[in-house]
Image (cartoon, coloured by chain):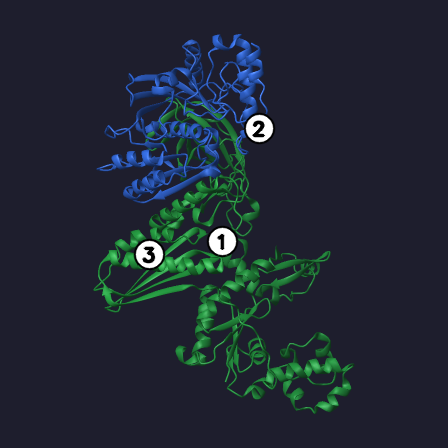
Chain colours: A green, B blue
Amino acid sequence: MTRIVSLWLPQWPIERMRRESAASCPDDGAPFVLALAEGKALRISAASPAALALGIEPGLGLADARARCPHLLCAPAEPASDAHALLKLARWCGRYGPALNLDGPDGLWIDVTGVAHLFGGEKALLRDLCERLARFGVTARAGLAGTRAAAWALARFSASPSIAPPGGQVAALASLPVEALRLAPDEVRLLRRLGLKRIGQLATIPRAGLKRRFPSRDDCEAVLLRLDQAMGVRAEPAAPLAPSPFHCVRAAFPDPLISSEGVSHAVAGLADDLCAALDKSGLGARAATLTLWRCDGGTVQLRAGASAPSRDAGHLLRLFAERLASADLGAGVDVIALATQGVERLGASQKIFLERETRLSAARLIDRLSARIGAAQVFRLERRDSHIPERAVTRRSAMRGEAKGEAMPAAPQRPLLMLGRPEPIAVIAGIPEGPPLRFTWRRLTRCIVRWQGPERIAPEWWREIATRRPSRPRDYYRVEDEQGARYWVFRDGLYQRQGEDGPPAWYVHGLCG
Amino acid sequence: MKSALSAGVRSPREPAPACVPRNPKAGGAGPRTHLIERLRASISAIEQNPVSIPRPPAHPGTGEPGPACHPSRWTFGARPVDAALPGGRLATSGLHDIRPAAHGDGPAALAFALALAGRRLSMHGASPLLFWGFTAASAHETGAPHGPGLIRFGVDPAHVLMAEVRRARDLAWAVEEALKSRALGAVLARLPDMAVLPLRRLTLAARAGRTPCLLLLDHHAAAHGFADSRWRVTALPSAPHPFDARASGAPRWKIDLERCRGGTVPQTWQVEWSDDAYCFAMVAPMADRADAARERRVLSR
């Protein structure tokens, strides 16, 4: 008796965008749409609830929508990112069932046959699923039935969460409109003209009479196929998402291992076996997990990652060696398992900056450092497309490989060290646009003998559409004091344009050598 | 003279020679040999330039072979300083201590260390990667490294691997691992004042990995006997900007060589770092010092 959950995420593109960057989407109250270029026209592909309330629906042209609602906010749609994020969400839903796959650009189906008792019943399962998704900020509507088509119909056309009892698809679907059968628009129009508005009516009508009403036999066959699939009379096979390949080697010992040297020796043997398995399939491991089961029932789990796929047993062993030496083995270890978490084809293209040996040793160094200090603490600097100084450069974890962006520009000159937050300073300067003459920072007064500037950096207005208090333009000066120390200071705001924030303030942002 | 000429014409495919100034008396007429050296330097500079940092072919004015041709020795580019070092260069598998003279000279010491690292990374046969380790506390106090600011000192930010650690012990471990890995051209670390600095281990690791380690210590850190050279840096008022009278030009530092393995007398120099030729230059004598003092008085009035 199969049971399938169908999940519909009606606001997926907008909610996905909001999850990734809250600043790019305005609040729920404002009408907001996503537009996609189709041919020469821009058409709306997704609309927020406020926009839907004003009558703006997907499929409408953007110009018409703007005519109806002049203060409509719009952003470009990103179908590729939506699909990718939906795939990641689908993998997370793997906790509800063994087989699942995507169903359209905004839906999933999950096979929960025999799983419901783990969650305390089917109702509890659906409630748990919807609540967890709501906590992520994703509105979801779920339906559970014996066939995929019936679950699809319940999720979209009846109140969520709705459950059809086993074998009771006919009764559950009877009151739903015929669009719930995933028919083409022409077929739906024909059925409505015939007066068949509900699935129940379609199911009870004799088939011979129906065949005469359709323009061709194929159309009628298509409609009846959908109906039979929904009722469970004909099968609708669907392939689940293939899980990522998983290599695991395990060793069990008749007597528990009590010393860490013994454990290291055993792990060395397992690493050799694992790398032999990876070698046979031509893959390299990016992350590996070592699990030790102690004889008192506890487990110790260690994870390690590599910045480049590797199947070198020695390298894998060194990543675990440090933490293994300090792991708590309890009374002894019974079983050890070593599994890969992420695999990649070995020999993927790499940049030809460095010699091969140097590149390999650098990758190994990065892995060892990241294993002890943390992957986010070992980084490279990457250029970002922004002229605001604190946003112009980001840290990119060294495990993720080399940055692919452009080289950093040599002009204009920037300081060597930049403070995390600009610190306020007391300045004597000419008003309205004079350079600083003297300033006090960290309780030391410094007299300025040389200065260069101002370099005006205006705020990025396109990022601050939704904020109420946009930031002010800054005038940066490179100054030098009598001892020869150089600073990078700025004035935040202009005297001519003092808004509600008050007069301009001075800050020090960086130190130059 | 003929032999010097024919020896001077080389096809671009041959590897560039080591850029050591030749004795003009040995090879023939002085100016001709200088010209040949400059041409050689510019050809090798055209062949071997990294893409992101523009390097001019030769330093104009002096007859020295341009510092941009990849040297095979770790030098300063300024003759008096190089002459004082044992062997005319810094040791490439050892520890070099750099301390600021006072607390406010910290950024100047860092800039000096970066300049030395940049010269080391452009050496022939050295890996172009630099490892820079610092603690979160020092990043909070004086700021974290900013990518575009490194270009001025000849270090390409794309080739810098950075590590920010919370504990000083982890930083010492990371520096040791980086030195032993043999994948880097130089290692730069700002070690805070720890009770016991594992300097002997770092020296051994530097020798084993044949990688130089530039250690930035606090101005009050105790002296120790493991370093190959010990420097103290003071910031000086900078050179006048060539185009703008009020702006600051090239950075200037007073560097004190306090101790050097190989037995040198402690000496002090005033050097200036040239942004466009990526080398050190000696600061011109007293003549423009009076001008600078007069300017300062005028500006502060």
Label ID, residue A346: 1
Quick check: A305 left or right of A91? left
Callout 3 amino acid: Ala
Q: How would you rate the neighbour count of disc 3 (Cα within 10 Å): few for under 14, some for 14-19, many for 20 or more?
A: some
- Find residue A396 and report its horizontal and vertical position in percent: 46, 46
**To which residue does mark 3 refer?**
A268
Q: Kindly identify which chain the residue marked by label 1 belongs to.
A: A
Foreground: disc 2 or disc 1:
2
Where disc 2 sits, the SS reads loop
Q: CA distance from mark 2 to mark 1?
A: 34 Å
Task: Look at 37% across and 16% down and name the residue there.
Answer: B83
Quick check: A185 left or right of B197? right
Residue B150, relative to residue B268: is it above or below?
below
Label ID, residue B292: none
**To which residue does mark 2 refer?**
B13
Q: Quadrant of residue A483?
A: top left
Quick check: A494 left or right of A66? left
Q: CA distance from mark 2 to mark 3?
A: 48 Å
Q: How would you rate the neighbour count of disc 2 (Cα within 10 Å): few for under 14, some for 14-19, many for 20 or more?
A: few
Work out whether disc 2 and disc 3 sit on a shared chain.
Answer: no
Callout 1 amino acid: Leu
- Find residue A38 and report its horizontal and vertical position in percent: 70, 59
- Find residue A255 and report its horizontal and vertical position in percent: 23, 67
Q: Nearer the viewer, residue A128 or B269?
A: B269
Work out whether disc 3 and disc 1 sit on a shared chain.
Answer: yes
